Image (cartoon, coloured by chain):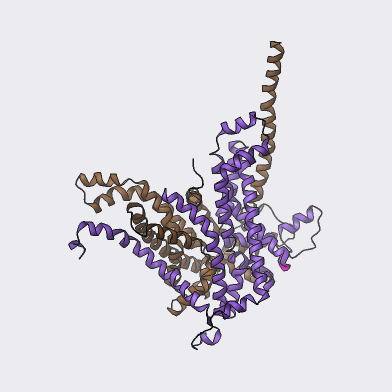
């Protein structure tokens, strides 16, 4: 069939044939669930519907119920605060490490880089098991070291109080994400030419001024991209929080949006409400991604 | 006058590198301390996995395996659940890697070799999908897999994985395909090869490193995935390695846990990942921020 098509026509069709497989799998794995979710978020879809009762359309009822639920707003505020603080600390620490890498001899730099790579490479579930043990109340290294430093923790259970629970989660997230930031910013820093820095030095600029006035503007594109990526990544912390909840507090005080969706969807069987929360988290992600996508496409167009 | 000046100059040049060295040493010490802290959890995992359980029971942490043993590994592997989970992980990962490589490779060819209507929109969609969090879709994906009767099957889970992995893989391969000039292929065709022949003999071998890098990336994604696996693989018989490892932590909430065995289990899951990761790390980082870091 295709042989009878004129060559021109075939060349026009070729790219569409090539992307059709990818589009098909994306429609199946992402598109269909997304559409199902949008439809379900406007339906009453609870346990009765699971067992065959037809789902009735209820308009914005699911969303209205959420908006009236203080629990939802608490979880959202906690998620967003965790995401913003986590991403902010990660970028600041990562940038500091990158600057540090430019000031140390090659051998030391390599040591630091290998150490960061190890943390980056750790599979998330393995990392969580290790960290949960490190913060274990009886046999954890953290309580032991703090005790040895003279701060008696009295076998403090870090994962039983929401504040220290989120602190532990934050430490783990920062530990995992700093390497990517450090490497990306370091790559950016090595592009800043020595002559410019030297010229500024001759003009009397001190270290902080040189960083703020010369280096920072030059690496701003990298900084904004890694900040954006970290904001997006710190919203998807379902695995971290599920495992921390396995070992510690399980009530809604310890929830972020991901675990909240899981509990009302897979746990309580209220798919209408879980779909509405899912749409909410997707909308936040897409809004955040917009800037990232724009900068990536700008490069593609050029 | 000149003598005085040259003297002070000499002192200046002598002093400055010395101050530089002092601060270099100070920064180096800071860097070493950071390196030790950052690597500690990984070291702790591997080291503890070789320490006899009886020593780990003590309340004083053991920072070095003085009496190394493999008994923790023997204990972890004893009931065979590791090998079952390994089998499931290998199955899911293999399908996800092969599937996503094929689909992504074809799409990457289209993007870098053709200018067609909808090309930029396709890229836009890919970039957005790449950002979507699994927790925003996994309940819907669970419902879909369940209604297809594919819960607790390798194929049901790996199809979802392919959809998650394809976007970044396309993005990664696109650069490699664009790196092989179309003129090379055309020259081979002038020399008498067919279009397919030219592609298979010239372009494909040049793309091999790119396919390997993208394949390793896909492997890491599928091998480490937790969220989708949690909802689509619900029975113990169908657990992947991350779900299997989580079982240990879940058990720790209710009973005294054998941390030596848990660390052995974690090490078994982590080591292949760390090895593979070191291969692709450079490309992964530059793929995510390409355009932002530019000379």
Vertical position of residue A52 compared to residue A242: above or below: below
- Of residues A206 and A27, the one nearer the viewer is A206
Residue A250 part of the magenta-drawn span: no
Q: Which chain is brown?
A: B
Residue A279 in the image: above or below residue A146: below
Q: Position of residue B203 (x, y in %)?
A: 31, 49
Please tell me in which quadrant of the rendered image residue A13 appears.
Answer: bottom left
Q: Is residue B25 left or right of residue B146?
A: right
Q: Quadrant of residue B20?
A: top right
Chain letter, colour purple in render: A
Q: Position of residue B47 (x, y in %)?
A: 63, 54
The residue under the point 70% across, 55% down is B62
Q: Residue at x 57, y 51 (%)?
A: A224
Point out the stretch of residues depicted in magenta.
Answer: A149-161
> Is residue A155 one of those drawn in magenta?
yes
| Rendered-image quadrant of the N terminus of chain B | top right
């Amino acid at each position: 069939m295709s042989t009878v098509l004129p060559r021109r026509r075939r060349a026009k069709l070729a790219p569409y044939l090539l992307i059709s497989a990818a589009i098909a799998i994306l429609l199946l794995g992402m598109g269909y669930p997304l559409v199902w979710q949008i439809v379900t978020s406007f339906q009453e879809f609870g346990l009765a519907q699971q067992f065959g009762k037809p789902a009735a359309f209820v308009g914005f009822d699911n969303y209205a119920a959420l908006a009236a639920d203080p629990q939802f707003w608490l979880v959202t505020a906690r998620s967003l605060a965790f995401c913003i603080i986590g991403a902010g600390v990660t970028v600041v620490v990562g940038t500091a490490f990158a600057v540090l890498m430019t000031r140390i001899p090659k051998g030391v730099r390599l040591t630091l880089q290998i150490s960061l790579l190890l943390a980056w490479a750790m599979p998330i579930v393995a990392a969580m098991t290790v960290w949960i043990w490190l913060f274990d109340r009886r046999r954890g290294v953290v309580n032991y070291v703090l005790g040895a430093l003279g701060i008696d923790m009295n076998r403090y259970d870090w994962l039983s109080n929401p504040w220290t629970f989120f602190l532990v989660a934050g430490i783990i997230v920062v530990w995992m994400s700093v390497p990517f930031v450090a490497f990306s910013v370091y790559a950016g820093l090595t592009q800043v030419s020595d002559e410019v820095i030297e010229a500024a030095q001759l003009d009397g600029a001190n270290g902080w001024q040189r960083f703020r006035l010369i280096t920072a503007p030059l690496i701003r594109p990298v900084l904004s991209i890694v900040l954006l990526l970290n904001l997006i990544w710190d919203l998807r912390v379902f695995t971290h929080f599920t495992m921390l909840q396995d070992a510690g507090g399980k009530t809604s005080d310890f929830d972020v949006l991901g675990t909240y969706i899981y509990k009302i969807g897979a746990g309580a069987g209220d798919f209408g409400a879980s779909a509405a929360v899912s749409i909410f988290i997707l909308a936040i992600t897409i809004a955040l991604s917009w800037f990232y996508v724009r900068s990536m496409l700008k490069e593609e167009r050029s | 006058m000149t003598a005085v000046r040259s003297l002070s100059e000499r002192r200046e040049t002598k002093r400055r590198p010395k101050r530089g060295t002092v601060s270099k040493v100070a920064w180096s010490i800071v860097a070493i301390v950071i390196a030790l802290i950052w690597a500690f959890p990984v070291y702790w995992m591997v080291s503890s996995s070789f320490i006899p359980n009886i020593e780990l029971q003590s309340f004083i942490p053991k920072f070095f395996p003085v009496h190394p043993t493999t008994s923790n590994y023997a204990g972890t592997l004893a009931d065979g659940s590791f090998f079952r989970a390994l089998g499931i992980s290998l199955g899911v990962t293999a399908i996800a890697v092969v599937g996503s490589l094929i689909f992504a490779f074809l799409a990457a060819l289209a993007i870098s070799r053709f200018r067609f209507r909808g090309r930029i929109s396709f890229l836009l969609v890919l970039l957005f999908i790449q950002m979507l969090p699994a927790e925003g879709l996994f309940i819907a994906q669970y419902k879909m897999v369940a209604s297809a009767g594919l819960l607790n099957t390798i194929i049901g889970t790996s199809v979802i994985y392919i959809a998650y992995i394809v976007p970044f893989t396309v993005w990664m391969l696109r650069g490699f395909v664009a790196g092989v000039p179309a003129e090379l292929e055309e020259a081979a065709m002038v020399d008498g090869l067919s279009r397919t022949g030219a592609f298979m003999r010239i372009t494909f071998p040049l793309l091999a490193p790119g396919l390997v890098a993208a394949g390793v990336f896909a492997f890491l994604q599928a091998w480490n995935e937790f969220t989708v696996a949690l909802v689509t693989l619900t029975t113990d018989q169908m657990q992947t390695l991350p779900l299997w490892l989580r079982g240990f932590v879940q058990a720790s909430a209710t009973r005294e846990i054998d941390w030596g065995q848990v660390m052995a289990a974690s090490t078994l899951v982590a080591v292949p990942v760390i090895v593979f990761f070191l291969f692709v790390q450079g490309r992964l980082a530059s793929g995510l921020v390409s355009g932002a870091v530019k000379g």
